[in-house]
Amino acid sequence: MIEYDLVSTVRELSSLRRLDLIDADAVVKWAIEHVASAPSNGALVQIACEQTPAESFAVDNLLDELLAENGEPPMDELTAGWTIARLLAERIIGGSIPADVGANKIWWDVAIKVPNLRSRLQVFNGLSSLWEDDAKHRGDYERDIVAAAIQLLEDPIKSTQI
C-alpha cells in the first residue's frame, strides 16, 4: 500500500487520463519520478517501466490496478469529472489560477467531456462568458466564479463520495 497523498495524486492522474487531459507519457514520467517512494508497489513499477510513447490503454489499466492495490475503485468518467472540477474549484478559491481561466477549464475540460455534469457546471460557462463580454464588471464576475467554486466544493451530492 502507498501513502495517502500519493493515492490522491494517482486519483488525480487517473481522472486526467479518463478525461484525456494528459497523455500516457506524462503518467509514465510521473511514475518514474515516484517509484522510489513505493518500490514494492507492482502497478507503479509497471507504469514506470512502460516504453514511451506509452500505450494509453495499458497505462489506464495500470492506473486502475494501482488504485485497486490501495483500496480505491477504478476511475469512471463521472468520478473523474467531479474530481477535476473540484480540483479546479480549489485552485480558483486558492488563487493559483485566475477565476476566469478556472471557470473556462471547468466548462471545456470537464462539462463538455462529461455530459452528465453539464447542468451542474453550467454556471461556470455563463460566468466565464459574462467575464469575457463585460470588461467593466470583471471583478464582480470573478467574485461570482469564486462563490460558484465554493458552492461546488460544498455540494453535498459528491463531497462525501470523492
Image (spheres, rainbow, N blue to C red):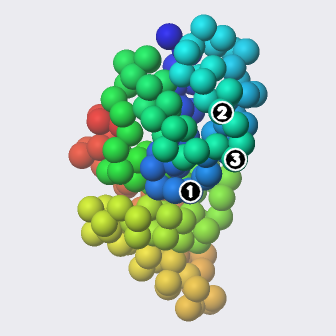
Mark 2, residues whose alpha carbon is within 10 Å: few (<14), some, or many (≥20)?
some
Q: Is 74 situated above or below 136? A: above
**How far apart are the two marked residues, 3 and 1, measured between alpha carbons?**
16 Å
Give the structural element (helix, strand or loop) at label 3.
loop
Q: Nearer the viewer, residue 152 or 31?
A: 31
Give the structural element (helix, strand or loop) at label 2.
loop
Of pointers 3 and 1, the one earlier in the residue sequence: 1
Of pointers 2 and 1, the one earlier in the residue sequence: 1
Determine which of the numbered discs, if any, sits on residue 50 in the image: 2
Marks 2/1 in contact by CB < 8 Å: the verdict is: no
Q: Tell me the residue at 63%/20% (across/down).
A: 45
Image quadrant in which you'd find residue 138: bottom right
Image quadrant in which you'd find residue 99: bottom right
Q: Amino acid at mark 2?
A: Glu
Determine which of the numbered discs, if any, sits on residue 135 in the image: none
Image quadrant in which you'd find residue 134: bottom right
| Residue to which mark 1 is pinned | 21
Give the structural element (helix, strand or loop) at label 1.
loop
Front disc: 2 or 1: 2
Q: Tell me the residue at 58%/71% (across/down).
A: 100
Marks 3/1 in contact by CB < 8 Å: the verdict is: no
Q: Tell me the residue at 54%/38% (across/down).
A: 59
Q: Amino acid at mark 1?
A: Leu
Q: Nearer the viewer, residue 52 or 10?
A: 52
**How far apart are the two marked residues, 3 and 2, measured between alpha carbons?**
8 Å
Determine which of the numbered discs, if any, sits on residue 53 in the image: 3
Q: Would residue 33 be seen by someone viewing this image from the given angle? A: yes
Expressed as whole percent of the image width and height from the top left, the position of residue 125 reads 44, 76
